[in-house]
């Protein structure tokens, strides 16, 4: 790689990779450090999308526990930056987070992925607390109102959703100006296109219509950042390279390299954009360091 790389989104012990395998994979791809993120969610919410999560994640618990993150930090202190997002609906979530920061050196509130609106009052209190602690908030968004309206009327459906729509993101950025938010997920990235409501697809294809809601919110809220990880982030750029070049150029100071997996899709897509060395350095490393200094 041309730059030292920081991957802002991966998890311990999932998709066949334990901690040692993750580090080997990082070495293979030239990744210097990874934000090792936990995922806390009640079992009844976790079960909604199963058996998929049970097949791919550590079977010793639900999601990605703080304990697994701490194991990574202890075994590979030079390779991982710890993230954990206790469910903000928990009465003592902020106290638990503070203890995790003080005892285990947690530096990111993430990944937040719960079946709740992220502008819930308890969540707002958590984000403001994160701002006081200097922790960025990394969230998964997956709840576009167009799909909900079409599916929720069916009696026995129990949709998998997280966070709300992009209006929720606009709200939390406005209410918590001292907190840096990092967006990720199908509900976040499909909004790069102005015609997002025209499809139920989580990973739309075809040309991007200009001035999508994501672009509008990014222009209004300087405390919102973008995580390129997973199929959603990669797809948002790869589906329309001409639009992607313009988007990356405009928001190059707020786009972060992440994978949420173990392949090279993000590298390959960014290479196709033929970015300047300065812009590449920001995305691969410098923007992450501004949020969480190494």
Image (tube, grey):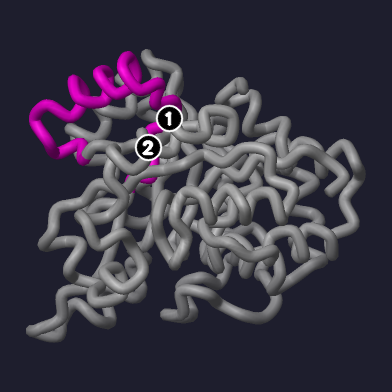
Residue drawn at (12%, 26%), measured in percent from left and top?
A: 92
Where does the image place residue 53, in percent across and percent down from the top left?
30, 68
Measured as percent of width and height from the top left, residue 276 is found at 91, 45
Residue at screen point 65% across, 39% down: 6
Q: Is residue 181 visible?
A: yes
Q: Secondary structure at mark 1?
A: helix
> Which mark, residue 71?
2
Height in image: 127 above or below 86?
Answer: above
Q: Is residue 215 visible?
A: no
CA gap between label 2 and label 1 equals: 5 Å
Which sits in the foreground, 87 or 224?
A: 87
Within-10-Å neighbours for mark 1: few <14, some 14–19, many 20+ = few
Q: Horizontal and vertical percent for residue 66?
A: 29, 38
Residue pointed to by mark 1:
74
Span highlighted in magenta in the image:
87-112
Left or right: residue 41 versus residue 205 is left
Mark 2 crowd level (few <14, some 14–19, many ≥20, 10 Å Cα) = some
């Amino acid at each position: 790689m041309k730059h030292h790389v920081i991957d802002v989104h991966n998890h311990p012990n999932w998709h066949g990779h334990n901690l040692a395998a993750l580090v080997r994979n990082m070495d293979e791809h030239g990744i210097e450090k990874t934000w090792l993120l936990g995922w806390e969610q009640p079992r009844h919410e976790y079960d909604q999308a199963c058996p998929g999560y049970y097949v791919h994640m550590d079977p010793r618990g639900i999601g990605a526990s703080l304990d697994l993150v701490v194991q990574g930090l202890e075994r590979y202190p030079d390779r991982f930056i710890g993230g954990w997002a206790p469910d903000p609906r928990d009465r003592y979530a902020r106290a638990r987070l503070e203890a995790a920061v003080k005892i285990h050196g947690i530096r990111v509130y993430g990944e937040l992925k719960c079946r709740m609106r992220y502008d819930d009052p308890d969540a707002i209190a958590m984000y403001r607390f994160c701002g006081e602690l200097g922790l960025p908030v990394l969230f998964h968004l997956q709840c576009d109102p167009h799909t909900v309206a079409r599916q929720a009327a069916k009696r026995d459906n129990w949709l998998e959703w997280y966070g709300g729509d992009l209006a929720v993101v606009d709200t939390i950025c406005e209410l918590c100006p001292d907190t840096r938010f990092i967006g990720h997920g199908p509900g976040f990235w499909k909004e790069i296109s102005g015609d997002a409501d025209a499809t139920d697809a989580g990973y739309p294809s075809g040309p991007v219509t200009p001035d999508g809601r994501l672009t509008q919110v990014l222009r209004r809220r300087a405390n919102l950042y973008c995580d390129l990880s997973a199929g959603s982030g990669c797809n948002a750029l790869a589906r329309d390279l001409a639009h992607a070049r313009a988007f990356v150029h405009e928001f190059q100071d707020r786009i972060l390299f992440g994978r949420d997996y173990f392949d090279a899709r993000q590298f390959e897509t960014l290479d196709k954009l033929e970015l300047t060395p300065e812009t590449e350095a920001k995305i691969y490393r410098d923007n992450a360091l501004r949020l969480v200094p190494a």
